[in-house]
Amino acid sequence: MSSVFAPKSVIVQGITGSHGSFHARAMRDYGTNVVAGTSPNKAGESVDSIPVYRTVRDIQAEHEVDATVIFVPASAARGAIFEAIDAHIPLIVCITEGIPVHDMLAVRQKLSTSNCVLVGPNSPGIAMPGQSKLGIIPSHILSPGRIGVVSRSGTLTYEAVSDLTRAGLGQASVLGIGGDSIKGLDFVDCLAQFEADERVDAVVLIGEIGGQSENKAAEYIKTSASKPVVAYIAGHAAPAGVQLGHAGAILGTQSESAVYKSQQLRDAGVTVVDSVTDIAPAIQTRLGVTT
């Protein structure tokens, strides 16, 4: 993995909110170096000894910042991401859900002129088990291993990661890219990271209906991936035109369906399973691991 995903110095935008404060403590307790947070009206206070500043620039006057985790409300998320981009923070992880599409269109345009990496929005975050986590992935389900996990669904991520831990496989990296239709990091970006990462022996991909991300991932795997991939696509029974779960989980065209995406992945050599609980056993089979 690129070193950008293992930051040495992390801040939390929106640290004084209930989610921001809870998860800032949880991240620090897991080993993440959380140096500060922002809350425009509470500068000078602290959250369990983590200092609070008014702006990201104010933090940078006193601390190195390699990554930020954003917990602000949806109405303020565009401004928070813009602030992080303007501050040239290499890694931006946005947990906030419900950000308006036109706000994310503006974010994507601004992001395209920067060197920042955005994970999310509507993401559970990322984790390097045994080292650090950025976001809300529960610490107790993580364990160090050699499997790369990338997913659009937070809940299904937790289930798959927990099963990999119970199976003794663990994880090298866990990347929750979020379920919104307009987001930063996508499947292909993560697959390329896993392909180049010597710590990763196999990959778990969890997708769902809506969009073309899984189909693009299949094209990448067909031409560029050498490591075994096991995938699960949620939403085989989804009715057309109804938003399910995530903002991006809407079945429009046939190519956005779980059936089509599953077949594209199978054609690319991926082992596609029918249930998320089948992922860990399928990984064991692909790696020749006996239980």
Image: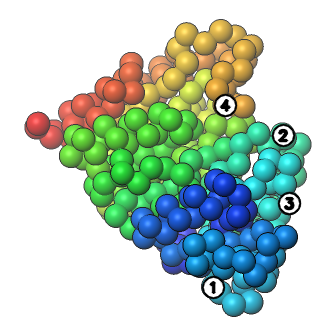
Pick whichever of labels 4 and 2 is earlier in the sequence.
2
Using residue 55 as the reference point, say whether residue 219 is left or right of it: left
| Residue 121 percent coordinates (x, y) | 69, 48
Pick whichever of labels 2 and 1 is earlier in the sequence.
1
- Helix, strand or loop at label 1? It is loop
Residues packed near mark 4 inside 10 Å, few (<14), some (14 to 19) or many (20 plus): some
- Which residue lies under the disc numbered 1? 64
- Helix, strand or loop at label 4? It is loop
- Helix, strand or loop at label 2? It is helix
Q: Is residue 170 above or below residue 290?
A: below
- Which residue lies under the disc numbered 2? 101
**Is mark 1 in CB contact (under 8 Å) with mark 3?**
no
Please name the amino acid that badge 4 sits on.
His
Query: Which of these two is toward me, 224 or 256?
Result: 256
Pick whichever of labels 3 and 2 is earlier in the sequence.
3
Q: Is residue 31 above or below residue 103?
A: below
Please name the amino acid that badge 1 sits on.
Glu
Q: Indicate the quadrant containing the N terminus: top left, top right, bottom left or bottom right.
A: bottom left
Residues packed near mark 3 inside 10 Å, few (<14), some (14 to 19) or many (20 plus): some
Residues packed near mark 1 inside 10 Å, few (<14), some (14 to 19) or many (20 plus): some
